[in-house]
Image (tube, rainbow, N blue to C red):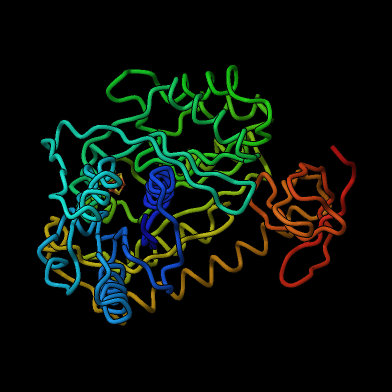
Amino acid sequence: MAQIALYTLGCKLNYTETATLARQLVARGHTLTDWDQRADVYILNTCTVTHQAERKAHKLLRQVHRRAPNALIVVTGCYAQLRPEALQREKGVILIAKNNQKPYLAQAIDDLLREREPFLPNPPFKEWSFWPSSSGEGRMRAFLKVQDGCDYRCSFCTVPQARGPSRSASPETVIQELYRLAQAGFREVVFTGINLGDYGKPHGASFLSLLRRIEAEGPTEIYRYRLSSIEPNLLSDEILDFIADHKRWAPHFHLPLQSGSNKILGLMRRRYRRHLYENRIEAIRRRFPLAGIGVDVIVGFPGETETDFRETQHFLADLPVSYLHVFPYSERPGTPAAAFPDSVPWEVRLMRSEILREISARKRSAFAQACVGHILHVLLETEEEGLTENYIRVHVQNGQVGKFLPILLTGEEKDGLFIGKILGRQ
Ligand code: SF4
């Protein structure tokens, strides 16, 4: 049996898939080891969202080949899906598995170890199947992939080609997986997807019906459910009402905005404009005055003039959200936007990122300050630290791992975290 090291770049979905692959390898009798240790097989799960992620993949592959020249190196993920030829050139790479081949990878690695030709089926794009997967972060929080792929065609994005058409786990599979996670000791589950709100293809169950089923049939041991990023046009009033009516569902939302300029949103081929976005933020705030709201934004998209950027800047400065994730636009080969005119110089992209990051820091601390004096609920990941429902990391005294407790958020801080005073024990 082999020593196998895995490394993941990119999004939460990639992490869930690496974790699932790791479980499959262990079930086949292999042992896992750290990436910086000697191993017989190294598996790198790549990302292609930015140029930096691709560069890092090459760097990791070279490092590993220098350390263990005889090891088998396997590469998978979005970069492997889109640019296998670029990875093929790296020394020691013996197998490149596309995203849709991940479910067969554990078997293929066994084949390689037995010096047999690995079998990796390659279904046509439209027939990509859903591979259920989940990963744990710490001991308490798990990420469960319920949807994969995307049928949107945002002009800057390679994800639809890299991850295939939109498809989802059946509600039965989701419930089953929740019981497994509860049994493994997880107490919070974050539902993830590439386009989460588009859940339901091909079986037809709506996202809201999935949430209702989870609430009715899911394991009681899970104290809290959280949604990861959801497209603003798919976050309906009905979903918000459902979350407001069921206390296990966290008032924490992550809504990609990408730009506050309607002109740029049009060029990006996003399916909403700023008015709809503003309306969704208001809809959240009306129901959840203390909701944590995260916003993704891209600066320096081709054609973004100083005036367009100012529009985004002012829009965000006035928007009652809690924090921003700011990304300088990165040209991705093969996307329509990569050929758009009026490219923005890199130094301007970085300067604009900096301006928005400052706004984000102010929003983050104003949001935490607004929560001071309120009672929140924390799930303790260590004896001293945990996350509230609205995504504030707090410090507590004399806690117990895995406990879900009401706390009073005080104004004091320790190690950069707000202090929560435990009010009762559950
Ligand atoms: S919604 Fe747009 S940005 Fe998000 S994965 Fe789909 S195409 Fe990419």
Which x, y percent locates residue 319?
A: 53, 53
Q: Is residue 121 above or below residue 97?
A: above
Task: Say which residue appears at 15% left-offset and 50% top-offset.
Answer: 116
Q: Nearer the viewer, residue 275 or 280?
A: 280
Which x, y percent locates residue 203?
A: 31, 19
Quadrant where the N terminus sits is: bottom left
Q: Nearer the viewer, residue 303 or 419?
A: 419
**Drawn side of residue 70 relative to residue 396, left or right:** left
Q: Nearer the viewer, residue 349 or 405?
A: 405
Task: Say which residue appears at 60% left-offset and 17% top-offset.
Answer: 216
Q: Is residue 189 above or below residue 98?
A: above
Q: Nearer the viewer, residue 291 or 274?
A: 291
Q: Is residue 35 above or below residue 207?
A: below
How many tags in the picture?
Answer: 0
Task: Say which residue appears at 35% left-offset and 39% top-offset.
Answer: 195
**Drawn side of residue 236 relative to residue 385, left or right:** left
Which x, y percent locates residue 249?
A: 62, 33
Which x, y percent locates residue 36?
A: 42, 74
Q: Quadrant of residue 275?
A: top left
Quadrant where the C terminus sits is: top right
